[in-house]
Image: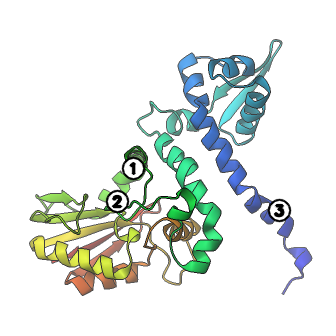
Amino acid sequence: MGSTEDLDYPQIIVQYSNGFLISKVMFTACELGVFDLLLESGKPLPSDAIAAGLSASTMGMKRLLDACVGLKLLAVEMTQEGALYRNTEISNVYLTKSSPKSQYHIMMYYSNTVYLCWQYLADAVREGRNQYERAFGVSSKDPFGAMYRSDEEMLKFMAGQNSVWSICGRDVLAAFDLSPFTQICDLGGDFFNDSIPEAELYILSKILHDWDDDKCKQLLAKVYKACKPGGGVLLVESLLNEDKSGPVETQLYSMNMLVQTEGKERTAAEYSKLLEAAGFGMIQVKRTGKLYDAVLGRK
């Protein structure tokens, strides 16, 4: 086994410790409208023009723009008149509000809600419960298991989820041949209290990870009862490796479930066990290689 000198500890520790700085730079540029302004301008702009257009200080905006250049979110061109900034392609596609693939809303939810809750991660680990009430002083809960300070925040969250679906939904829906199902229900709303309509296929997209095993079994049993014979249920979730060794994104999502909800991310075997407990069989699993995977169970 090599000595500690063989391992590049300083680099990886610095990289990890700076992670929240990187995300906050991106969130702030989105919130202030930097990428939208540059897209609308149709041409590169100097930092003072960007600052004036966004009612920000010249000094602060210059530092933000340069940080975005370092992160490859902006590009800079040096001219005789000074530095001119423009969006990179990735920012035009994913960080401007008008783009069909915009991730703006999920960025704002992460910045204004998730980021604040994660300040209490140590408390969540100690107590084994979410920290929304400690972070915001309110304890309202929506039917999906997440918690919100207002209807506006809930709408921002839903818009954010829709934006994520815009870049990964096609892969999930293509995971299995769903053509035999002609009556499909994308399950949402207060599904624990409201009746579930009869259908051939139910899609539960990022729902079960909000809840503990007992609540998941309760919901799946209700879906099974409503499901037509020969029908099924499609779970859209981010799957952990069976040994829980990764993927790291899913591990981080599971930490977020601890901080914000009653649930957790699970392995394919764990989801299969929940489906079987509700009566579903012929379970198939498809890893998409993207943000979310698919698990299909049949009645």
Location of residue 83 in the rendering, given as x and y in whole percent from the top left corner = 78, 21
- Say whether disc 1 or disc 3 marks the residue closer to the N-terminus: 3
The amino acid type found where label 1 is placed reads Met
Foreground of the two, 297 or 257:
257
Q: CA distance from mark 2 to mark 1?
A: 8 Å
Gap between marks 1 and 3, in whole Å?
A: 38 Å
Residue 13: image location, x then y, percent: 79, 65
> Which badge, 2 or 1, is on the more N-terminal residue?
2
User: Which kind of residue does numbered mark 3 sit on?
Assistant: Gln
Q: Do the CB atoms of the residues marked 2 and 1 lie less than 8 Å apart?
A: yes
Mark 1 or 3: the one toward you = 1
Specify the quadrant that holds the C terminus.
Answer: bottom left
Residue that carries the numbered disc 3 in the rendered image: 11
Color theme of the render? rainbow
> On the rendered structure, is 162 left or right of 54?
left
Eye-nearest disc, 2 or 3: 2
- Report the Cα–Cα distance between label 2 and label 3: 41 Å
Residue type at the position of mark 2:
Asp
Name the quadrant containing residue 142.
Answer: bottom left
In percent of width and height, residue 250 lies at 52, 68
Q: Nearer the viewer, residue 180 or 66?
A: 66
Which dot marks residue 142?
A: 2
